Amino acid sequence: MDLIESYSEELQLIRKPFTRVWVSGLVLAAALLPFYAPESVIPLATMIMVWTVGIMGQNLLIGFTGQISFGQIGFLIIGAAVFGHLARAGVPWPLALIAAGLAAGLFGILVGFPSLRLKGPYLAIATLGFGLAVHQIFSHIAVLSGGRMPLDVPQIGDLWGLPEEIVNFYVCFIIAGLFTLLTYNIVSSYMGRAFIAIRDNDIAAEVLGVNLTFYKLLAFGISSVYVGVQGGLTCLLLGSISQNMFPLTDIFDILVGVIVGGLGLVEGSILGAAFVRIIPQVFSKSAGLVPIVYGAAIIVVMIFQPLGLAGMWLKMRLYVRMWPFR
């Protein structure tokens, strides 16, 4: 294995020329997906990218900072509600999407205050209470959710001669790519190292000069921005706001994506999003099997592969790199 000779080299996203080649090829293949994949695959791929954003944000909070949160449904709803009502008021969708993320981030900071006193299951229960409260408020106030009649939200529509589905795909592809690059930069920065230090031992991190209050709240705020953007994108793709647009099971879908994809691995967020979106499609005729598959996957990952699907991918790469010496 090549030794890293400088800090700047360590901060590089891709250090080896060969890695640049296959990563570029993979990104190009994903970008050209609408031109060679069946039409039924495009909406699924679009939703995978939308969920990648949210799961990546939760991975920053749970996988990198070690703060367990069950309040994701609340941030999804806040993001979708802010985006939908701003879009209905005539605000351009990019600005509405930014506002959705910022609004969710603000609530994330407020919800993060219990993390200064609570840990583990106590923090999880506190955040779950927030998520359930937001879900109930949204579902029972017609002004927010439309009540029994969904509120229409303007969509992007056809653009540059491309059908709406393909336009949606590329919008989500670009946004997911930007958030992936942002996440890699956060993880490799001082901020990311502070998150990891808090996860590993918060007392030792504080002794070394890490401001626990600031970085815990920052982790909650950043992760909530990601989930808020996911909610806004979901509203954009659905073209409406409705009281049933986010079922409570989405809480567990995001957690399953983080755990099965790979805790503390950016690549794991992408693989986890693919897992939680593909499995319901595979078992669409037997929806009752989906929770069983999720539960079995979590058990298998916890016992045999703690780093999830991304860990398996890293082991395969290491195996090929070290061959024939192993």
Image (cartoon, rainbow, N blue to C red):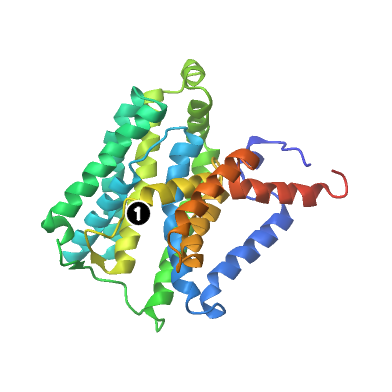
Which residue occupies 84% across, 50% down? 323
Q: Position of residue 139 (x, y in %)?
A: 19, 53
Going by the image, does 262 lie left or right of 101?
right
SS for callout 1: helix
**In the displayed structure, would residue 58 be above or below residue 172?**
above
Residue 174 visible from this viewpoint? no
Which residue occupies 59% across, 68% down? 28
Q: Position of residue 281 (x, y in %)?
A: 47, 66
Q: Hey, what amino acid is under mark 1?
A: Val
Q: Position of residue 34 (x, y in %)?
A: 51, 76
Residue 272 visible from this viewpoint? yes
Q: Looking at this rendering, what residue extends furthest in the right direction?
A: 324
Front residue of 282/70: it is 282
Q: Position of residue 55 (x, y in %)?
A: 45, 49
Q: Which residue is mark 1?
A: 229
**In the displayed structure, would residue 68 be above or below residue 321?**
above
Quarter of the picture holding the N terminus = top right
Which residue occupies 50% across, 21% down? 205
Binning the other alpha carbons within 10 Å of mark 1 as few (below 14), some (14 to 19) or many (20 upward) gives many
Going by the image, does 4 lie left or right of 160?
right
Quarter of the picture holding the C terminus = top right
Which of the 4 image quadrants contains residue 114? Answer: top left
